[in-house]
Image (spheres, grey):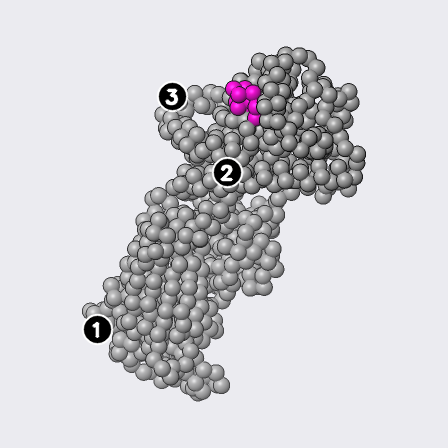
Amino acid sequence: MVPVLLAAETCLHVNLLKTGSVWPFSLLTPSVTLEFYMTVNNYWILNARHINLTTLSIAGGFRDYQVRSGLTFLPKLSHQTSALSVVSSAVPKTWVSTDHLSIVWCKQLQLTTIRAFFDLIDADTKQITQKPKKKLSVLNHHFIRHPAKQFEEKPSIISDLTGSPTWVPVKAAKWSYVAHNNSDKIYFAFPLANHRKSHTHAYCQSTMLDTNSWIFGCINSTSMCRQGVDLSWKAELLPTIKSLMLRLQDYPFLSHIVIYVPPVHGSKFFIDCEFFKKETRSIKLPVTHLFSFGLSSRKVILNLSGLYYNIELLNFGQIYQAFKVNVVSKCPRGKKEITSIYKLHIPWSYEDSLTIAQVPSSTEISLKLHVAQPENDSHVALLKMYTSPSCQYEVTIKTSFPQILGQVVRFHGGAFPAYVVSSILLAYGGQLYSLFSTGYCLEYATILDKEAKPYKVDPFVIMIKFLLGYKWFKELWDTLSLPELEAIVLTSQSMCFPLVSLILFLLGTCTAYWSGLLSSASVQLLSSLWLALKRPAELPKDAKAMPSNLPVLTVVFLIVSWTTCGALAILLSYLYYVFKVVHLQASLTTFRNSQPVNPKHSRRSEKKSNHYKDSSVQSLRLSAQDAEDSLRMHSTVINLLTWVVLLSLPSLIYWLKNLRYYFKLNPDPCKPLAFLLIPAIAILGNSHTVSVKSSKVLRTASQFPFPLAVGVIAFGSSHLYRVPNFVIIPLLYHAICNFL
């Protein structure tokens, strides 16, 4: 977020829609970032009573694909109500969603912000006001609900109805007036005595979007009054109209409602009013079930010739719900196109959105949330429809499965890499166990299909979440200083989506499968290029021998990590590993090309069995079968390391962007990881399965990936910087298997 601090002690802190602008710091060191945010949040929570701070946070809405709007909503404390959070689509005179960049230069939003800054200036000091109430009033006026009047700190509630206007009594329940070239003032008076008996609400709207008062209430008047209560401050500005809804029982002291029409020269505008019972205009519409997949729908027809309808969207309050609303308007022939406004109002957060339609037409509206409904909130989401009385409207709602998936990605997409790594870890453990039990390594795709199952991971996470509900287990958990379970964090944020873990696991497994195929194909392609550019390579003569320059190379990578950036050293060691695997693939291809076209299978099997019998020999020439097994294992390790490199890239990018300022990244979140990962990569890049399968610790090494796959989901789905820490452990054990 971009803070604009206007004073030292009392300030307006405007998060101008640039929530991701702290990205360099957040990419620098995630653990430090987490600690920083916790420190800042705790400070404001503890000191909110004593700090005169008014905060406004504006989000971009659904067009911002980088930072979802729910993350910009500020927590409200019981004693601290000076924090406002709003989505740009709900800001008056803006009414649009913005992407992550355009939110800074969006002209509508710029003008709204400028108007607010001018109204915040104290007339006496010529500086930003120090009055908390005024600051909050200004922000509410410009960013929450605009009454189509200029801001006044102390508005005049009583207005004089002076001059020699024409008074016109109106007794009808529905009334319309077209103002065009009027030379005199006109007051239209609506007596309320009779309307109170048969109606509960009064609604008026005007297309004259000036900032003058236009609707008043008379107290104890017979037909006209000299002074009236200015009801214009209760109005709401919309894109094409300003409207006012009055509940008559809230104004028992009013005898008349008065509409003021000023002299008009050359312009034309419309004024409409109607009285109605709430029951006739408030319609309950239960939303369709989540798993209806759009096959079923619910429909309501509005044919009462009204100006306003209120549709209550029952059971709509979760972030994973998403619907398509289709509004079809039918008007009599010969009618000109009329503008209708459909407003989605979310009462528990300022994330309203407006849709403007030219009727007759068919308009599609998307219904989805940025913030879930709080547990103690009983309000209902509303679809407010400002309609034409001459038209009939048909509203149909049905579940949108693509948009549900979009909500899953929006709220849980950040956890996706954790599920991919978890699937690869399960396959990795399966390959190590296959090497231990059968003496050979299974294909990556085969073992992934066999081992990567959601029921191997999710039940453990659910069990831990259940046990944390018991005090004794929670105390034990805290004693071990274990981090908070990700599932509990999501539940506290009302982000727990049924089957979301299953969906992400399936998508993660698919990604792990295709990334495995891609890495294998890349190795094949690079090995072909190697053979085209260099002379054919041979299989290693000693499968257990390590290159003499390996310690030197390892030290060089460690020095790079210490003096520059850990992520850079990880990337270099990763490229070295890929190089060694490509070299092995090229050697195997050369060996196969030099063999007879149709070798006997029995002879191959005999060589393989003899090879296993002689596995205790210190110096072993690598066979083609061992090379194939090694490549299968290397393919999985490359897949794991690829995700480690991707998750460490933010630190590398930040280091490169700031290289002109400093050469060494400090603090460096990848440095500890690099010091453990570099030796493991160096050893694994020169190891083969023939030297691993005889290890005494291979069985132990094959058992580690499974609990770590559970740990990745339990602790790394929302904190991705933890994921590489779970990957390094099985790689270290795998490397140790070459020596024990």
Q: Nearer the viewer, residue 255 or 701?
A: 701
Q: Does the stretch in magenta take in 435?
A: yes
Of callouts 1 and 2, the N-terminal one: 1
Residue at disc 2, secondary structure: helix
Residue type indicated by callout 2: Thr
Of callouts 3 and 1, the N-terminal one: 1
Residue type indicated by callout 1: Asn
Residue 219 in percent (x, y) is at 30, 70
Instruction: Name the residue carrying label 2.
Output: 509
Residue 66 in percent (x, y) is at 56, 49
Residue at disc 1, secondary structure: helix
Residue 677 visible to an observer of this rendering:
no
Question: Does the residue at mark 3 contact the one at mark 1 (Cβ under 8 Å)?
Answer: no
Disc 3/disc 1 C-alpha distance (Å): 67 Å
Which range is magenta? 432-441
Q: Residue at x 28, y 61 (%)?
A: 283
Q: Which label belongs to residue 231? A: none
Splitting the image into 4 quarters, where does residue 347 fall?
Answer: bottom left
Instruction: Name the residue carrying label 3.
Output: 472
Q: Does the stretch in magenta take in 470?
A: no
Residue 590 in percent (x, y) is at 72, 32
258 shown above or below 62: below
Q: Which label belongs to residue 194? A: 1
Residue 518 in percent (x, y) is at 61, 41
Residue type indicated by callout 3: Trp
